[in-house]
Image (cartoon, grey):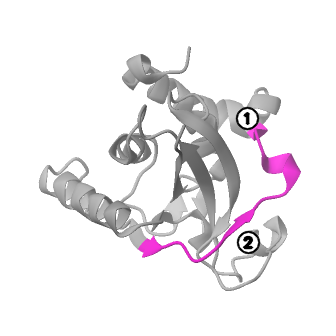
Amino acid sequence: MTTEMATLAGGCFWCLEAVYDQLKGVVSVESGYAGGKTVNPTYQQVCDGTTGHAEVVQITYDPAVVSYQDLLNVFFTIHDPTTLNRQGADVGTQYRSAIYYHTPEQKAIAEQTIRDLNAAQVWNNPIVTEVTPLDHFYIAEAYHQEYFARNPNQGYCRAVIAPKVSKFRHKYLEQLKK
């Protein structure tokens, strides 16, 4: 199997990881940080907003099963790409909407997807998702990995993540892992 990688920021990395873990063709999802200037940042440093990093997920996927476009379609379904540096109650540059591309083809697909969604006026406001090359991915601390799967009854998981997972499962039923 040949795999490719995608790196996406759409607010809290726990939310994105919980969704992409269930998507057919996704081999693995790691929560981490990208887009900033600090080497090997900690969660606390990223939350303080001083590193420039966003919370991201790095997705390893099988392009024979799920396309990069499919990953972006899910991405734009499960978060609000029109709010600058915020997702719901989470506010700060670490919660920005961003696509960190690995190849020129990914960049072109991301930019075209944003143009198409803006033209279709899917949202009342324009998309502010940044599209930028991935410089470096730093994996988050172990306790952030598979957070929703390990903590489904935690308050944030029940109030914020579970509804996103439910929305995803409803819309992408045919693309769920068995």
From this viewpoint, is residue 106 visible? yes
Residue receiving disc 1: 148
**Kind of residue indicated by mark 2:** Val
Q: Residues within 10 Å of mark 2 (few under 14, many from 20)?
A: many
Residue 53 colored magenta?
A: no
Classify residue 95 as left or right of residue 175. right
Vertical relation: 118 (above or below) 3: below
Q: Which residues are magenta?
A: 132-147
Residue placed at 70% from the left, 81% from the top? 51
Residue receiving disc 2: 46
Label at residue 104: none
Q: Quadrant of residue 126?
A: bottom left
Name the spot of residue 120 as percent of width and height, x first.
14, 49
Q: Quadrant of the N terminus?
A: top right
Report the number of discs. 2
Mark-to-mark CA distance, 1 and 2: 20 Å
Vertical relation: 159 (above or below) 144: above
Check disc 2 and report its element: helix, strand or loop.
helix
Residue placed at 65% from the left, 40% from the top? 28
